[in-house]
Image (cartoon, rainbow, N blue to C red):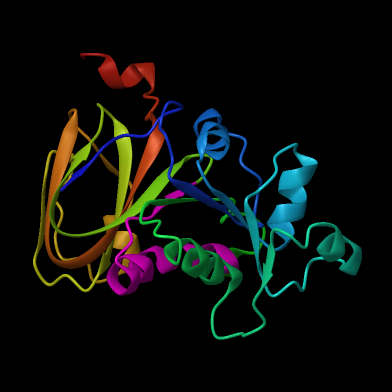
């Protein structure tokens, strides 16, 4: 499978907006405005409306919405009281029930670090359990889950981090430092692309982060002594 780069021109089947930091990067904000279907998690719906966007749906347990807000937007609010899943997963199930397979997640990082980590790891669950192709976009880059052999479009000096979720055989081509079956989550971080693509081979699932911008080198790095 090929994982392309994303930019301001990407057309998005659906965006799920979390109640973390509101997107400010040009790519992230373009994805938010270009989505065919916009689904917000609880409090994110209120913030989305405050930013001038009307979501197609607001999904969650309603704990961060006032009774007045719920009455005012009752036609797009879907309250799900069960607590087995968080609001992000409830919103994902809402989109899945509408036949949506490609979802971009925004506003899922920032604020509480435990929520950030949990939301990022959920991308692996959504791929393996729900059969989705999710992309989690931040103001610095984006995460995609993958398994097996895949080609990732890239550019020179793009920063790449890889998180292993069960691979016992793992290799790479096109990265500055060769990959291996990382035993700890930190081991695959802070790698770098050396061309316009890189290839990963794994016998299980893994999560890949690519930055929007490449590494800014110190001019001294290019001096020949």
- The quarter of the image holding the C terminus is top left
Q: Is residue 176 left or right of residue 127?
A: left
Q: Position of residue 106 (x, y in %)?
A: 54, 49
Depth check, front residue: 8 or 108: 8
The span picked out in magenta is: 115-137
Across the whole image, how many numbered discs are drawn on residues?
A: 0
Q: Is residue 112 above or below residue 178?
A: below
Instruction: Decide whether the magenta segment is chiefly helix, strand or loop.
Output: helix
Residue pictured at 34% horizontal, 67% vertical: 124
The answer to whether 221 appears left or right of 103 in the picture is: left
83 falls in the magenta region = no
The percent coordinates of residue 102 (x first, y second) are 37, 51
- Is residue 118 visible in this depiction of the protein? no
Nearer the observer, 166 or 42? 42
Q: Is residue 23 left or right of residue 182?
A: right
User: Residue 202, position in %: x, y?
Assistant: 12, 62
* Residue 139 seen from this side: yes
């Amino acid at each position: 499978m090929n994982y392309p780069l994303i930019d301001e021109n990407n057309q998005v089947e659906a965006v799920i907006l979390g109640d973390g930091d509101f997107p400010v990067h040009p790519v992230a904000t373009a994805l938010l405005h270009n989505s065919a279907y916009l689904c917000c998690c609880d409090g994110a719906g209120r913030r989305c409306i405050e930013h001038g966007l009307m979501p197609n749906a607001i999904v969650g347990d309603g704990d961060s919405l006032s009774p007045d807000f719920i009455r005012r937007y009752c036609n797009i609010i879907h309250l799900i009281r069960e607590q087995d899943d968080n609001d992000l997963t409830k919103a994902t199930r809402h989109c899945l029930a509408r036949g949506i397979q490609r979802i971009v997640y925004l506003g899922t990082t920032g604020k509480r670090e435990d929520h950030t980590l949990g939301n990022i790891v959920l991308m692996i669950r959504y791929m393996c359990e729900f059969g989705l192709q999710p992309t989690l976009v931040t103001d610095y880059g984006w995460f995609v889950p993958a398994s097996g052999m895949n080609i990732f479009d890239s550019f020179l000096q793009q920063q790449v981090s890889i998180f292993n979720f069960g691979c016992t055989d793992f290799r790479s081509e096109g990265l500055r430092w060769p990959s291996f079956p990382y035993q700890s989550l930190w081991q695959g971080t802070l790698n770098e692309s050396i061309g316009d693509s890189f290839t990963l081979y794994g016998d299980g699932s893994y999560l890949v982060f690519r930055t929007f911008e490449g590494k800014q080198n110190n001019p001294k790095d290019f001096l020949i002594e």
